[in-house]
Image (spheres, rainbow, N blue to C red):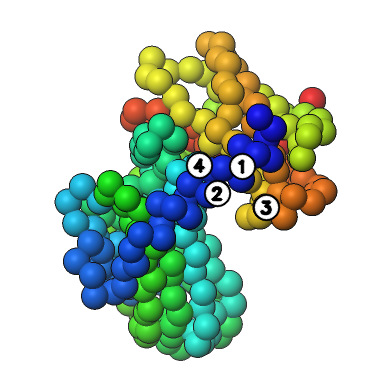
Amino acid sequence: MTNVMKHTILAALLVSFCSTAQADATDPQATLTVLTGHQTKSGSVMAGLRIDMATGWKTYWRAPGDAGIPPQVTWGGSTNIGSVAFHWPTPEVFDQSGMRSIGYHDSVTVPIEIFPNGAGEIRLKGEIDIGICEEICIPATFSFDTVIPANGKRDAAITAALLNQPLTATEAGVGTFTCTLKPIEGGMQITTIAALTSTPNAESIIIETADPFVWVSEPKVTRTPTQITATSDLIHADGKAFAVDRSGIRMTVLSHGRAVDIKGCSTP
C-alpha cells in the first residue's frame, strides 16, 4: 500500500468518526471558558482558553496524531490584536481504534499570549473548532466574545498550564538536532536525529513541520542512551510537491514525568 493510499484511508476514517454527531457550546460534553489573565513583563497579555469536558472525554493537541482532529481558531471581530502565540501544555498519548492520538482528557487550559497593537483593552472574538471524543469523535464549534482588560489579574489555571509546558531544548540539555530529507512516492521522508539522554520511561516522539497542510506519519524510532532517531513520511494534503523549511521542523519527546520541545533542525 502506498503512503498516499494510507493517508487517504486515514482521512476517510476521521470523516466517518466525525460525521456521526455535532456538538456546540450548549452540549454537555464540553464547555469553553475564556480566561482573561494578566499583563506580562514584556507588555504582552496572557489569556487562556479552558475546555472542560464530561468525564472520560478528551480533546486534541496542536498535532493530534492520525486519529485526532486539529484545533482551529479564528479571530474575526477581535480588536487590538497584533499577533497571538499559543503555549500548549504537555499532552498525553492515547490509542484510538488502533491509531495514535495526542491530547488531553477531562479538562485543559491553553494559555494564549496576545501582543496588542496599542494600549487599552483587548477584545477576543471568534470561534474555535475542536474534536471531543469518547467512543466516537464529535466536531465541536464554540463562539467567544470577551474583553481582556490591560490590567487583569493572574489566573491560577493559566499559571499551572504555563508550568506544565515541555522543557526547551536548552533546558533539557539537547545537543545537535539534525535532519535529512529524501523523496518518496507522493512526498518526502524525513529522518531527524536529536542528541538527548534517554530516561527509564517509554518515550513517544512527534514530528511536525511549519506547514499545517503537510501530513506527518507516526515516526519509526530507534534509541541509544544518548540519541533519538525518528523517521516519518511527509505528504501534502493536496498531493502536490512541496518544500520543507528546516527551521520549522519540530520534535516533541513525551515520556512519563518529562516532555521536551526541540525546534529547528540543521543539515548533518
Which numbered disc, 2 or 4, marks the residue that appears first in the sequence? 2
Which numbered disc, 2 or 3, marks the residue that appears first in the sequence? 2
Contact? badges 1 and 4 (CB < 8 Å): no
Mark 4 nearby-residue class (10 Å; few <14, some 14–19, many ≥20): many
Marks 1 and 4, how far apart at CA: 9 Å
Which numbered disc, 4 or 3, marks the residue that appears first in the sequence? 4
- Taking depth in this image into account, of 5 and 266 the one nearest to the observer is 5
Marks 2 and 3, how far apart at CA: 10 Å
Contact? badges 1 and 2 (CB < 8 Å): yes
Name the residue type under label 3.
Ala
Marks 4 and 3, how far apart at CA: 13 Å
Q: Is residue 180 above or below residue 224?
A: below
SS at mark 4 in the image: loop
Q: Position of residue 156 (x, y in %)?
A: 25, 60
Residue appearing at x 67%, y 49% in the figure: 214
The numbered disc on residue 11 is 2
The numbered disc on residue 111 is none
- Taking depth in this image into account, of 63 and 235 the one nearest to the observer is 235
Of the two numbered discs 1 and 4 in the rendering, the one whose residue sits closer to the viewer: 1
The numbered disc on residue 66 is 4
Q: Is residue 200 above or below residue 178?
A: above
The numbered disc on residue 237 is 3
Marks 1 and 3, how far apart at CA: 9 Å
Residue where numbered disc 1 is placed: 7
Contact? badges 2 and 3 (CB < 8 Å): no
Name the residue type under label 1.
His
Residue appearing at x 55%, y 33% in the figure: 218
Name the residue type under label 2.
Ala
Tell whether 100 sits left or right of 8: left
